[in-house]
Image: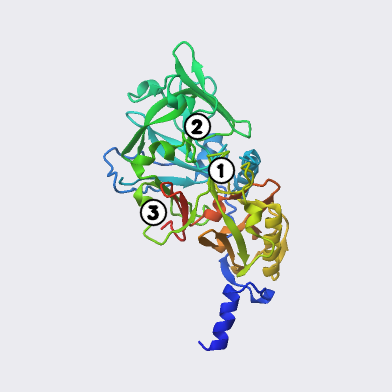
Amino acid sequence: MDAPCFLFLFSVFFSVVPVLPYHHESQTLLLRPLSSSVLPPTLSWPDPLETSDPTSPLLLPLQPVDTLFSLSSNLSLSPQSLLRLRLLRDASRVSSLPNSSSPGFSSSVISGLSQGSGEYFTRIGVGTPPRYLYMVLDTGSDLLWLQCSPCRRCYDQADPIFNPSRSSSFSPIPCSSPLCRRLDSPGCNSRLQTCLYQVSYGDGSFTLGDFASETLTFRGTRVGPVALGCGHDNEGLFVGAAGLLGLGRGRLSFPSQAGRQFNNKFSYCLVDRSASSRPSTVIFGDLATSPRTVHFTPLLSNPKLDTFYYVELLGISVGGTRVAGITASLFQMDQAGNGGVIVDSGTSVTRLTRPAYVAMRDAFRAGAGGLKRGPDFSLFDTCYDLQGKKEVKVPTVVLHFRGADVSLPATNYLIPVDSGGTFCFAFAGTMSGLSIIGNVQQQGFRMVFDLGESRVGFVPRGCA
């Protein structure tokens, strides 16, 4: 390469001097509109054998949890209708989030639509002998809980309700236990002197019942005992799953309780639910770190709220150029715990503080000026009518975290919303100070949570 050419490339990638709009970086997006078919829901997921080799993560063929939702609610919905419901739940979740404040073992994750908190389900054995149940995974929640009999009020779930009297490892936690005092709002059964729990969610859903210790089984690997809620009164939008496996950073989350057994590491990889037949997976233990290069960014601590995984976002590039006006100050957390950026598996669409979103959106619109605009869809205000096209060029998008530049595949930010060729820019603004990196933008990356080193990593193309 001759000197003038080299200097030009150097200035494009490393200089802060603005680049003319028509010199932007782009990538090809292969267009796959949503299917218009409405298929009758089916569900098949055999329970793992207890003789499974715990050192070898076994991946079972999985079906999207859209199916679990459809079966539980007795509905057959089109992909577009499911997307609308997903975005409505997403908006509800975001509005409820606070403005402040060994050998590995694995389990496959079903990609699909959730109710209440979380967007992904897995199947876990509970008790002794283990009863396998569908459980929501959620990095934005701490407490583990599931529906239990006798049930005063319970929502519909795909599996029989867990009966603790049939488990030899179930043990109520005394009111005097330090574990009971870790609950935000502990209660006490005065007659039995056993601990009671209650959790309420922002959408009005809640669960309450006995706080107990129990053993969990992940494909032949037994974990525990761990403290969990055994809910006898559960109401809200948790249709389908038996309960929730909290993967947050709080003291009662599953990683905090069982971290020593899996060396304080876990990871998940979420596939594009509309275009991939491969399963999403979650892995606990040293196997969670892919042999490929992991791009790590340090985790930050919020002294007011210990549940979420806070990271430092320094800026955003669109089309190979840092977007003017998007600086680290827009994403900083103040001394009161307000603001900041979290990585969240239960939020679908990335939310950015309004000034950052507007600047990023406008840069994308300028770079995609050759594409025909389409009508807005749900919370998306930048959509394109790409009917009849098989592929298009779109500006690149890079998220600059401290120590990690994450280049997003085009499928992670321009997504189909119908069967007619409408694609939308899958980011949104928020008036809250809290920005959220959602699971649409995480698709295809293995997200590595190394809690011992207090860092989170991104592995591109990590689902293989």
- Depth check: give the residue in front, 154 or 455: 455
Query: Along the line of sight, which residue is nearer the eye, 48 or 451?
Result: 451
Residue position for label 1: 302
Which circle's residue, 1 or 3, is located before the other in the chain? 3
Residue depicted at 44% across the width and 27% down the height: 179
Q: How many marks?
A: 3
What is the C-alpha distance between the residues marked 3 and 2?
33 Å
Q: How is the image coloured?
A: rainbow
Q: Is residue 161 visible?
A: no
> Are dots 1 and 3 in contact, CB under 8 Å?
no
Residue 66 location in percent, x, y? 53, 44
Tag 3: amino acid: Thr
Query: With respect to residue 316, does 39 lie above or below?
Result: above
Q: Mark 1 or mark 3: which is in front?
A: 1
Q: Secondary structure at mark 2?
A: loop
- Is residue 90 at all visible to an observer of this figure? yes
Q: Secondary structure at mark 1?
A: loop
Q: What is the residue that sits farthest to the front in this orientation? A: 335
Against 381, residue 69 (above or below) is above
**Mark 3, mark 2: which one is toward the viewer?**
3
Q: Is residue 106 left or right of residue 402?
A: left
**Are there few (<14), some (14-19), or many (20+) residues within 10 Å of tag 3?**
many
Q: Within 10 angstroms of label 1, few (less than 14), some, or many (20 or more) residues? A: many
Question: Of the residues under marks 1 and 2, which one precedes in the sequence?
Answer: 2
- The residue under label 2 is 157
Q: Amino acid at mark 1?
A: Asn
- Residue annotated with mark 3: 289
In front: label 1 or label 2: 1
